[in-house]
Amino acid sequence: MIPDHDLERQMRHALALAARGRGSVEPNPMVGAVVLDLTGSVVGEGWHQRFWGPHAEVFALEAAGGAARGGTLVVTLEPCCHHGKTPPCTDAVLRSGVRRVVAATADPFPRVAGGGLAILREAGVEVDVGLCEADARRLNAPYLKLLRTGRPWVHAKWAMTLDGRIATRTHDSRWVSGEESRRRVHELRGRLDAVLVGRGTVEHDDPLLTARPPGPRVPARVVVSASGNLPDRCQLRATARDVPVIVYTAAGDERKLTGWAADGAEVVALPPGDTGVSLDAVFADLGRRRFTNVLVEGGAGLLGSVLDAGAADEFHVFVAPKLVGGVGAVPPVGGAGVAAMADALHLAEFTAEPSGDDVYLHGFAPGA
């Protein structure tokens, strides 16, 4: 019998393997697997490497070969049991002859949802579920949210000065943060499905919003403009045929964006919300596209609306050791905000680390 502490160590290794698929496998979950022989030695490992590609169990069991027989499969998510883009992983598990499967968590995907574990148990395989479950669910929180709500995981990001400003009173914002922080942001963009900004950011900053250098994903550039009043000339419009651009506007104002549509942007008219376009409708549409992770980069108006709606799940904030001053300088978050400090959003799992000369702050919304 393999000691529990050894199984936990191997499950944490499997979780680290799974994380290697971040940005390459979505909207699938990240999954890692380790095969142990009868003595508890690792004889095979693998992870889900790309969407449409083989699953983690297949890689791990192929690497183990005959050494898997009678052994243990440690896997971060319940093996699938349906024919999708690849054959059922339960078939590969049963063919391998492993005696035991230790899974971190069940898969809520409707075509699995405990079915894979049931098939293995019915075939006489010993099945244990729940080892490092909290870590496995944190790893795949975006996948789980998309399944549960039909909405993507929302990352909120901004860079600000020590006195809490993202731009000066003249809206100059280049550059708030240093090179290392900007490198991290490009890396973040390159593993997400979309980058969202508001009309003000397009007008004042004329951003390109691409990942440079490119990452495993090419994020769609998304603009939310209830009025439909966007510049006739800007980098997003000029490159819309090269990298996808989606513009959400209020129904009735899409006629203002015929030029953008002619230049390759997709214009989507949505019902108006209390302060413009309904953000829930925006995220619902992105969810229908199977976008798993979305990055909201600003400006203050859009970020404020996202926070007021309680729509942000994860936060990435870069604080630069700079002071700009001025009551007219731009804060990172607008919107209505809260009336009492007791109602302020208190981030969970909060961390701080150096990022060049800056500080990178990271955390999650409570319950996310």
Image (cartoon, helix red, strand yellow):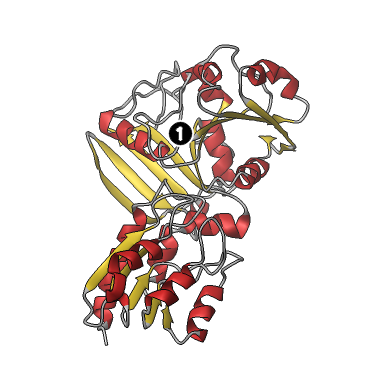
Give percent across and percent down for residue 296. 50, 38
Q: Is residue 271 visible?
A: yes
Amino acid carrying mark 1 in the image: Pro
Q: Nearer the viewer, residue 161 or 219?
A: 219
Residue plotted at (41% across, 81% down)? 128
Q: Nearer the viewer, residue 82 or 12?
A: 82
Task: Classify 10 Å Cα crowding around label 1: few (below 14), some (14-19), many (20 and above).
Answer: many
Q: Quadrant of the N terminus?
A: bottom left
Image quadrant where residue 346 sits: bottom left
Give percent across and percent down for residue 34. 31, 68
Which residue corresponds to mark 1? 332
Residue furthest toward the right? 252
Q: Is residue 277 left or right of residue 133?
A: right
Q: Is residue 338 left or right of residue 67?
A: right
Give percent across and percent down for residue 343. 52, 53
| Element type where label 1 sits in the image | loop
Give percent across and percent down for residue 186. 36, 33
Vertical position of residue 328 compared to residue 334: above or below:
above
Residue plotted at (56% across, 42% down)? 306
Residue plotted at (28% across, 40% down)? 359
Residue plotted at (53% across, 79% down)? 119
Q: Is residue 321 visible?
A: no
Residue furthest toward the top? 233
Vertical position of residue 203 compared to residue 148: above or below:
above
